[in-house]
Image: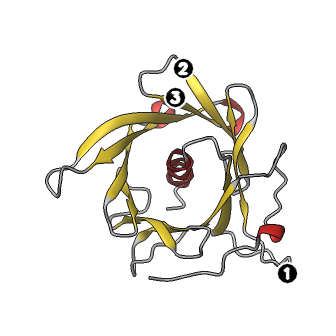
Amino acid sequence: MAKIQPLPAAASSSPCSGDQEGRQAYTVWMKSLVFNGNGCAVYGPDGAVAFRVDNYGCRGGREVFFMDREGNSLIRIRRKGFGMFRRWEVCRCAHNGGKEEEATPWFSVRRAEKGGAAVAMHGGAGTCYTIDGCSGSKWEYRVRGVDGAVVAEVARKQTPAGVVLGDDVLTLTVAPEVDHLLFLGLVVVRGLMNRSM
């Protein structure tokens, strides 16, 4: 598999408010590893491919799968509804010893006012996360918890020399106390919302 150069710890500064200690950084390349496919590849802190999304159908398909490096589905994302009622339903996949996959509803994402998005956990009382800056082709955005604290941030990737890479190479920085897979799934949903995947 492909490997990229990981960011040194000193060069991975981010404008997130709060303490940077313990935050995990992922590199997200919004291109598929499969020729003529739509999707993205996620590289871990060690520089190796950690996760991938491949959509062999049209761009912005109705259903995509978030997979680990072996190709096992971890998350299934389905687009539901139409127009202003459109939402993205996300299910966590469980494997039954090589048999049929079981998908458990996990969370849903819908557009909110002011160009943002609202995330509601399945069975929860309401919105538990909000995504600021979800409209347009701008890739810099933040995910906030109910209390307004930034729990994850996406920005364009910068090399240690300060060179900003292309629009399709991003850095996802996630707080240590949250489920990283949830926020990786939100990056994919955001790409589907803006039809960039």
Residue under circle 2?
126
Q: Is residue 6 above or below residue 13?
A: below
Bin the neighbour count of mark 3 within 10 Å (Cα to Cα): few under 14, some 14-19, many 20 and up.
some
Amino acid bearing label 3 = Ala
Q: Which residue is mark 1?
A: 161
Snapshot quadrant of residue 122: top left
Task: Name the residue tied to disc 3.
Answer: 120
Q: Position of residue 28 (x, y in %)?
A: 59, 66
* C-beta proximity under 8 Å, tags 2 and 1: no
Report the residue at 62% width, 32% height from top: 129
Q: Amino acid at mark 2?
A: Gly
Residue 31, position in %: x, y?
52, 72
Q: Who's the residue at 34% across and 69% down the image?
A: 70
- Say what amino acid the circle numbered 1 marks: Ala
The secondary structure type at the circle numbered 1 is loop
Question: Quick one: SS at disc 2?
Answer: loop
View extreme (left): residue: 99
Residue 35 sits in which quadrant? bottom left
**Observer-nearest residue: 174 or 80?**
174
Residue neighbourhood size for the residue with mark 2, other residues' Cα within 10 Å, grouped as few (<14), some (14–19), many (≥20)? few
Q: Look at the image and name its color scheme.
A: secondary structure
Local crowd size for mark 1, using a 10 Å CA cut-off: few (<14), some (14–19), many (≥20)? few
